Amino acid sequence: MAQEVSLDDYLRMAKERSPLLREYRNAVIINRLDSQLLRAAFRPQVALISNNVYAPTSGNFGYDEAISNGGQLSTVIQASKNFIGLSNLNAQLGTLHLSSDSMRNTFPAQWDPKLGIHVT
């Protein structure tokens, strides 16, 4: 018995397996992630920096504790904020938005607004 495959089945498989459509889907997802990274970069950043040195001593062997205090411990907490203007952030986000819009307009029938990506 022969298997029957309709034209709709072939079109659906072509949409699922199309490298071009997959590339557009991935580009939209990358644009969304890039915009999240940009927003995060404009928030305050906190870093903990630590420099620890242990000077071992054992009886008559090793470093003198009077000189080394047995080691050195130092810790720095650093907070930084990017003061580049909000207009710069909005311009960069606008570029990503325009790029996503152009991809949406390329295949408008494939666009799913709930997911924010092309669907197959």
Image (spheres, rainbow, N blue to C red):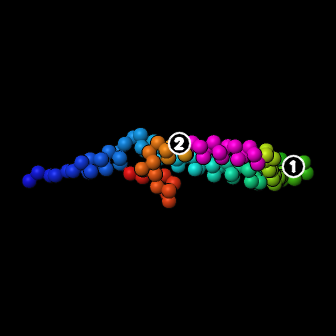
Spot occupied by residue 81 in the image (x, y as percentages of width and height): 80, 50
Number of disc labels: 2
Q: Secondary structure at mark 1?
A: helix
Q: Is residue 79 rendered to the left or right of residue 95?
A: right
Residue closest to the eye, 39 or 94:
94
Spot occupied by residue 53 in the image (x, y as percentages of width and height): 79, 49
Q: Which residue is mark 1?
A: 68
Q: Secondary structure at mark 2?
A: helix
The mark found on residue 26 in the picture is: none
Based on the displayed image, in which of its 4 quarters is residue 46 positioned? Answer: bottom right
Q: Is residue 40 above or below residue 21?
A: below
Tell me what residue is drawn at x 30 percent, y 47 percent.
11
User: Mark 2 against mark 1, which lies toward the viewer?
Assistant: 2
Residue 67 colored in magenta in the image? no
Q: Is residue 70 rendered to the left or right of residue 116?
A: right
Tell me what residue is drawn at x 57 percent, y 42 percent.
99
Mark 2 Cα shell of 10 Å, populated few (<14), some (14-19), many (≥20): few
Q: Earlier in the sequence, mark 2 or mark 1?
A: 1
Residue closest to the eye, 4 or 51:
4
Residue 94 colored in magenta in the image? yes
Tell me what residue is drawn at x 68 percent, y 51 percent.
39
Q: Which residue is mark 2?
A: 102
Tell me if residue 60 can be seen: no
- Report the magenta residues as a range: 86-100
Residue at the far bottom in the pictured view? 114
